[in-house]
Image: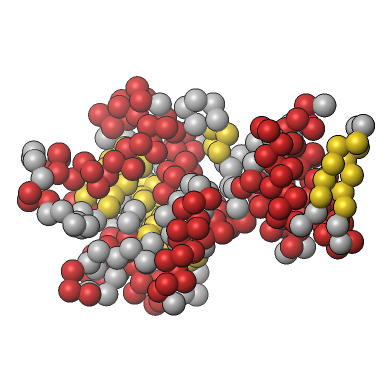
Amino acid sequence: MQDQIALFGMHDSNIKYIKKKLNVSIKLVDEYLLINGEDKDVDKAKLVIEELLKKAKSQNINKFFIDLVIDLIDSEDIDSISEVTQTIAINAKGKPIAAKTVGQAKYINAIKKNSIVFGVGPAGTGKTYLAVALAAVAYKNKQVDKIILTRPAVEAGEKLGFLPGDLGAKVDPYLRPLFDALQEMFGLDTYAKLLERGVIEIAPLAYMRGRTLSNAFIILDEAQNTTKEQMKMFLTRMGEGSKIVVTGDITQIDLPNKEISGLVHATSILKGIDNISIVNLTSKDVVRSELVQAIVDAYSANEK
């Protein structure tokens, strides 16, 4: 009974979504679901519902998870659903974290298997959040000694010099998303202690120059706003026992004078190198909200 309640969702939202997505009608008759529509649509809806019921005890059934199951069925890869939806981390509040889309699952697997990973895609695809979650897991499992997060301090409309405060206060808005993700993973108190001990380091990209970063999980966020020179400088900081994840959205480049993005350049010349993976996420991987997904699609269509 609980599985059926989870399947239907609040105010039958899940069933309504499946009906709309698969072009079928679904009715509850006694204890059975009656599905009507074209034969191929009915068969697909039946398979989707069966898979959702299998996962109802361990997985939050929502439209993102429904889309994931449908994508796996469409790609004839439904057998991998257990691997795709496997919990990768537990945040400080006890909430499990797992891939919500096929693209996110590929991104997670790439980070696990490679030393350098580029996660490229639009806002809301979980690029930074999932990287931070895996960094926290790597530290907790003693795979790394340190977590380093960095971003280029490139302005999108405001000049750093006009913002109040010292340098720390000025770069805080650029690094805030990284603060938030780490606090969610470790909890505020543990995060503060790790920050004080230098186990967690968050700094502007310029602070990486001249260093060798060993036994660390290093995340470069908003990498579309690096120059070619900055990207080369950053990638060559990597030392023994380290892992690098580079994230960015090439549709939101804020570099002045139409300068070539270091992210665009790096992903074009580093293809095919062993132990480097480039994962391209799309609007189908946007999990922030359905509206954000629609906005991304609209801008992509306009640019084309």
Quadrant hosting residue 209: bottom left
Q: Is residue 45 left or right of residue 88?
A: right
In the image, 265 versus 156, the foreground residue is 156
Estimate the x, y position of residue 235 in percent, counting from the top left.
Answer: 32, 62
Estimate the x, y position of residue 254 in percent, counting from the top left.
Answer: 25, 64
Quadrant hosting residue 78: bottom right
* Residue that appears at 44% across and 38% down: 136
Q: Is residue 89 left or right of residue 176?
A: right
Residue 290 vs 137, above or below: the answer is below
In the image, 278 versus 296, the foreground residue is 296
Q: Is residue 291 visible?
A: yes
The image's colouring method is secondary structure
Quarter that holds the N terminus: top right
Q: Is residue 293 left or right of residue 234?
A: right
Residue 143 vs 274, above or below: the answer is above
Estimate the x, y position of residue 37 in percent, counting from the top left.
Answer: 86, 57
Q: Is residue 94 left or right of residue 38?
A: left
- Among all residues in the image, which is located at the extreme top? 189
* Residue that appears at 28% across and 50% down: 150
Q: Is residue 111 visible?
A: no
Estimate the x, y position of residue 176 in percent, counting from the top left.
Answer: 29, 41
Quarter that holds the C terminus: bottom left
* Residue that appears at 29% across and 65% down: 253
Total marks placed: 0
* Residue that appears at 73% across and 49% down: 18
